Amino acid sequence: MTDHTPSRRDRLRAETSAEIKAIALKLMADGGPDAISLRAIAREMGMTAGAIYSYFATRDDLITALIGDVYTSAIQTLESARDAMPESDPGGRIMAWAQAIRAWALANPEGFRLIYGDPVPGYHAPDDGPAKDAELRACTGLIGLVAGAWPAAHALQPNDRQYIWTDFDPGLAAHVQTDFPDLPPAAVALALRVWGRMHGLMALEIYGHLRTLMHDPATVYRDEMRDLIASLGLMPPAPSQTPFH
Amino acid sequence: MTDHTPSRRDRLRAETSAEIKAIALKLMADGGPDAISLRAIAREMGMTAGAIYSYFATRDDLITALIGDVYTSAIQTLESARDAMPESDPGGRIMAWAQAIRAWALANPEGFRLIYGDPVPGYHAPDDGPAKDAELRACTGLIGLVAGAWPAAHALQPNDRQYIWTDFDPGLAAHVQTDFPDLPPAAVALALRVWGRMHGLMALEIYGHLRTLMHDPATVYRDEMRDLIASLGLMPPAPSQTPFH
DNA sequence: AAGATTTACTACACGGTGTTCAGCATCGAT
DNA sequence: ATCGATGCTGAACACCGTGTAGTAAATCTT
């Protein structure tokens, strides 16, 4: 369509759009997701609330774009934390991923809620878009972690044959079958279980259900991740190392 | 103070208070937690919004009361589901609890969000009250489940000695030490991990992160719970039985 | 039974929100 | 130089939670 070089107008438009998102993130960072109001954003930019509607058709569209940005940046953090460990240490890669996602969630609790909770009243996530892409990427990353442990894990808990590829989202199945040709669908189910295991304690902690019951949820999270890694037939990292508190 | 028999006024007041909460629950059930507005409740009751302030000082107080009610009723559901299984089958009791909480969450997703998520923007839970009681009760229930499996579970993963009673909330510690005198603090940590494991997949499913990746999250949840029970050194229930879909 | 008091409720106001729309000014292209 | 698209304003609408003042009724006291 507009195949020629981006005009000055387009550039300004993109800049303003980015500024809107940046200010929204700032508001969210120090006021919670509910502090994201079009009027507050406009106030901060010296504009009127109605002006934002030239950039985002509705507030939900803004939130959707925000979720896409936050999710993508979080995933990049996770992937680089994972890649800091050698592929020869699949247990270490899992632990690195697990600690990185908890550290990210603790540092950006509002971002965590934006992705995994109710971002804002009445908001309903669309079925596709960058957020879905990021979710697929997160899932693929987890499947990669599981793939590094699959032979041993499969031997420990041989409960496949009940899963078939059509159980899963077609896009996810296609991704996995090209990236990991030898991986059975049961491994994808195992990856989802691993995801759930990382998510559970973290969600409870972020939403304040653990701190009222115990101090230092980091220890129990670390134990849980060690148990998870061991249950996959892998060697957990050195016990003395306690990366996060 | 008012130690005499409840007068007619007190009764009417209690009834109106209950009606407010009932309508709030109804609004939440078919409109999401954000549909709980004092004006909507008053409209439904033929009153003015301001009138509610005679019953609840602020909207957060209403939400707090609501959370207490919902949490308490959920806990009762869980406990009766658990008690339908004999004490001689600790694995079955854990599975009953796990399936009951998932079934409840799927039937009352808004209630789940009310308890475990951001009920409504800007709401901050108080540090005590019926919600805290229900949380303690849920935690105690889980500890009871773990207590039934502690000897075997402890033998499988002997990583205690790093937990001491002062790691936990004093009220929780006192409860446990009177109800289960022989249980070490490491068992409480294990119970929290079990809680996290039940919570993870459920939260992901309720917030729509699983359905986009796979149909039938019930299967993977069941597998996860089977693995959990096995990891506690218990016998899982008969594999043929698939209680929920 | 009559007066005093507590209580339940309405009416209204204030500041906040998302959203829409007519109008205006400015910029880009013709 | 003109014309049309674009970005923005300002006002409006319909909501929201929260207070305050006033009113009427129910209750308690004497």
Image: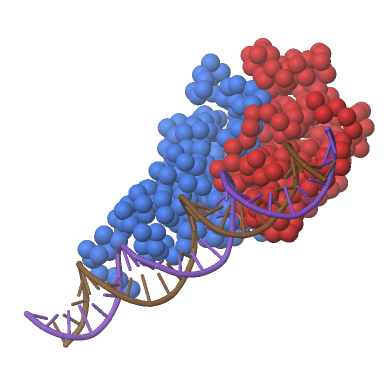
Chain colours: A red, B blue, C purple, D brown
Residue at coordinates 37% horizontally, 65% vertically from top-left? B54
Task: Examine the image and state in which quarter residue B224 appears.
Answer: top right
Q: Count every numbered label the image shows and give the total.
A: 0
**Relative to B226, A83 lies left or right:** right
- Tell me if I can see residue A143 in this picture: yes
Residue at the spot 57% in from the left edge and 25% down from the top edge: B218
- Of residue B193 and residue A131, the one placed in the foreground of this image is A131
- Eyeballing the image, is B143 above or below A143? below
**Which of the two residues, A58 or B156, is positioned nearer the viewer here?**
A58
Q: In this view, does D21 lie above or below A55?
A: below
- Tell me which residue sits at (78%, 48%) in the image: A16
Residue in the image at 50% along x and 24% along y: B244
Say whether residue D15 is left or right of residue B182. left
Vertical placement of B93 versus B127: above or below? above
Query: Image quadrant of residue B126?
Result: bottom right
Is C1 on the left-hand or right-hand side of A67? left
Location of residue A35 in the rendering, given as x and y in whole percent from the top left corner = 65, 55
- Mark yes or no: residue B157 visible: no
Q: In this view, does A100 lie to the left or right of B126?
A: right
Give the percent coordinates (x, y) of residue B55.
38, 62
x%, y% of residue A192?
Answer: 69, 28
* Above/below status of A164 relative to B221: above
Q: Position of residue B241 (x, y in %)?
A: 51, 19
Looking at the rendered image, the quarter that the N terminus of chain B falls into is bottom left
Along the line of sight, the residue nearer the viewer: B203 or A19 = A19
